[in-house]
Image (cartoon, helix red, strand yellow):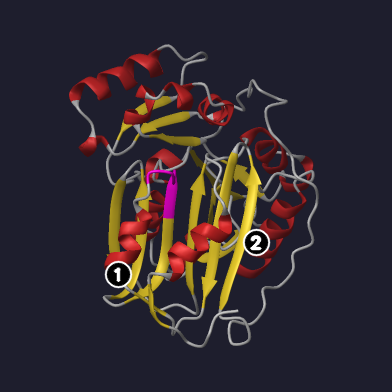
Amino acid sequence: MKQPIPTSLILGFLGAGKTTAILDLLSHKPENEVWAVLVNEFGEVGIDGALLEHSGAFVREVPGGCMCCVAGLPMQIGLNQLIHKARPDRLLIEPTGLGHPSQILEVLTGEHYRDTLRLGPVLCLVDPRRLEDQRVLDNVQFQDQVAAADILVANKTDLCSSEQLARFDQWAATLEPAKQMVLHTSHGRLQRPWLDGETDHRDVGHAQAHEHHAARAQVAAPSLDSQPWQRVCNQGQGHLSIGWRVHPETLFDEATLLALSMDARFRRFKGVVHTTGGWRSINVADGALSVLSAQPAESSRLELISDQMLIPAAVDQQLRLAVISWQQSPK
């Protein structure tokens, strides 16, 4: 009888560094093991999936909101397909930073997966600098992610002052019940042993905090050859996402695009984009910009998340100003 798959749930609020942490874990994966990643994004276009697709793992996306919505159906479909296809030795699950973990945990530990998955300690990444923002401390999604965590990890410590790290440690020490471990790291580096062990099945306090969405049929996106510029939006949890899928031969001016990405109205901006400097992975969180070389992809994908009232058509026009060469006239 096949042993249950070791499964790790990696939580974190917007910009905490979850995808970077998973990429780092995958870079240290034993060569003889098959790993799989179920990744969920608030937006519709799947940026994290694009970043992970060259990682050597099997990746399945659940875009368009929290994967636990609709009684866990989107999550269960994606999870079942991933397990059947990959037959993994280890499974990593990255929910959206705007998600509520209680129902995800209920699904993973429920009767249907009891003999299939073995849930290890739940990890939650926290950027200690965010503890200075009362809006974050008061956010019920943040509170519930922290409450669900068995292991709390201060990430991005290389960017923190000694006072910010001390505040994180003091705050973590007040949490009840106490965590299995409270750790520090930078650049999303998680140690493999942190994934081992078992979850404490912690109680998540805000059962009614999560705003569930109605069921939506997953409709295949149009071909980029017929519609080379596609814009999609999603709204909930007090946030708006605007995402784009763009034909890969459409070329963006890198400097103009990076200037737009730093718009103060955006809580997050990320993309895998064909630019004048080559294919780029762009990530902006809390005003910090990261630009890395990326593998050519089947499309350019961009997404922003904002907690302000934005007019999608107006932002779309701003993005179009960054284009210097069209695959064909956008519709």
Q: Quadrant of residue 86?
A: bottom right
Q: Give yes or no for residue 250 being in the magenta stretch.
A: no
Q: Secondary structure at mark 1?
A: helix
Give the prevailing secondary structure in the magenta stretch.
loop
Q: Quadrant of residue 224?
A: bottom right
Q: Which amino acid type is marked by label 1? A: Glu
Residue visible at 77% across and 51% down in the picture:
73
Residue 147 x %, y %: 55, 24
Residue visible at 62% across and 28% down in the picture:
201
Q: Which residue is mark 1?
A: 254
**Closest to the observer, 141 or 72:** 141
Residue visible at 31% across and 58% down in the picture:
259
Q: Secondary structure at mark 2?
A: helix
Stretch of the chain drawn in magenta: 264-269
- Can you say whether 136 is above or below 90 in the image? above
Residue 27 x %, y %: 34, 60
Q: Quadrant of residue 171?
A: top left
For label 2, the crowd category at 10 Å Cα-Cα, with few meaning under 14, some 14 to 19 and many 20 or more, is many
Residue 282 visible at all:
yes
Q: Which residue is mark 2?
A: 83
Tell me the distance, in whole angstroms, between the alpha carbons under discs 2 and 1: 38 Å
Left or right relative to 9: residue 15 = left
- Can you say whether 64 is above or below 297 in the image? above
